[in-house]
Image: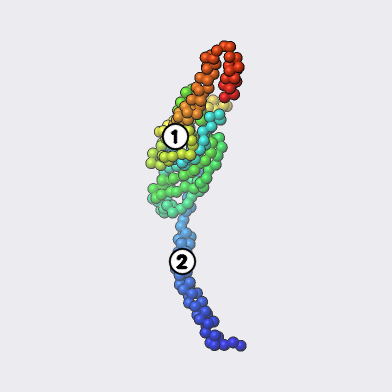
Amino acid sequence: MTNLSSNPGYLDRFTILKVLTALLLIFLMPLVSFAQTIDSAMDTLDCSVPKNTQAIRPGPEGEKTKVDMGFFLIDIKEIDDVEQTFTADIVFNASWNDPRLSEESLGRSLERCIIKLGDIWHPPFVDVNRSKGEKLLPKIVRVDSSGNINYKQRYIGELSSDLDFTNFPFDNQVLHFILAAYGPDAEQMVFEQDEESSGSRDHFSIEGWEIGLLDAVTSSEVIKSQGTGEVRNFARIDFRLSAQRDKKYYLLNVLTPLCLIVLMAWAVFWIPPTAIGPQIGLSTATVFT
């Protein structure tokens, strides 16, 4: 059997391996301890909410719940004149207060908790003019110590909007993103624009249009029951965008060539009537142009 002491090279490698293992353990021990501390804190964190906060609207009966709505425009990708739709990338933000979820009411804070939207009462609203698209963010909310709730969602897709082409190609369109409440609490809600979380980027990927952000309009969505004829007024907020068509494109690429073609066609009347061949040739060239 080979004596390890007689092989100094092997002994050196064995010693280095033991030293590296010891150093690795020294560095890993604080990380393991930190992870255990985090797990222990998460185990003691109570994120449960009372069941009555799921279906019952906060606030006394007869007093409407105010919902602050923010709108941030990330991008406008396309405006389809034929289908009267536009493709947008939007982030909207909804905030409201539920005193039942405050630290004073619960005796504990929910600030570090991630709560599902369906576990608490939330303002039910629908995208009125959405054609198709998808929502990218998870349906979760954040609650601070005062019971202020914040829900954020990102939406990418097509939205329909009534376009007016009377002044085409010098038209200025107004694009809409409409949110309206629905359900049993729809008449007990009121929307207000949250200006702090509203805005837009400076540049968009769409070509041939200049996009701007207008002030939101809050109103009521009037719904009439077909059976009883009962009229209900649901809360509604209309986020608006101004879209001005780029005039230079149509002036240089459409109107100017058309004027040149018309002038070329008029040149037939300056050719002597006896020159039938040149007249026919010029007229044919105009038609093909």
Q: Residue at x 54, y 88 (%)?
A: 6
Can residue 240 be seen from the camera position used here? Answer: no
Q: Nearer the viewer, residue 224 or 200?
A: 200
Nearer the N terminus, badge 1 or badge 2?
Answer: 2
Q: Position of residue 125 (x, y in %)?
A: 50, 37
266 w.r.t. 242: above or below = above
Give the residue at mark 2.
31
Residue topped by disc 1: 211
Front-lying residue, 204 or 275: 275
Q: Which residue does the image show at 44% across and 54% down from the upper left?
A: 112
Callout 2 environment at 10 Å: few (<14), some (14 to 19), or many (20+)? few
Q: Residue at x 53, y 38 (%)?
A: 157
Q: Are marks 1 and 2 in contact (CB under 8 Å)?
A: no
Q: Is 177 located above or below residue 11 in the figure?
A: above
Q: Position of residue 224 (x, y in %)?
A: 53, 27
> Residue visible at 55% across and 12% down?
272
Measure the alpha-carbon separation of dots 1 and 2: 50 Å
Q: Secondary structure at mark 2?
A: helix
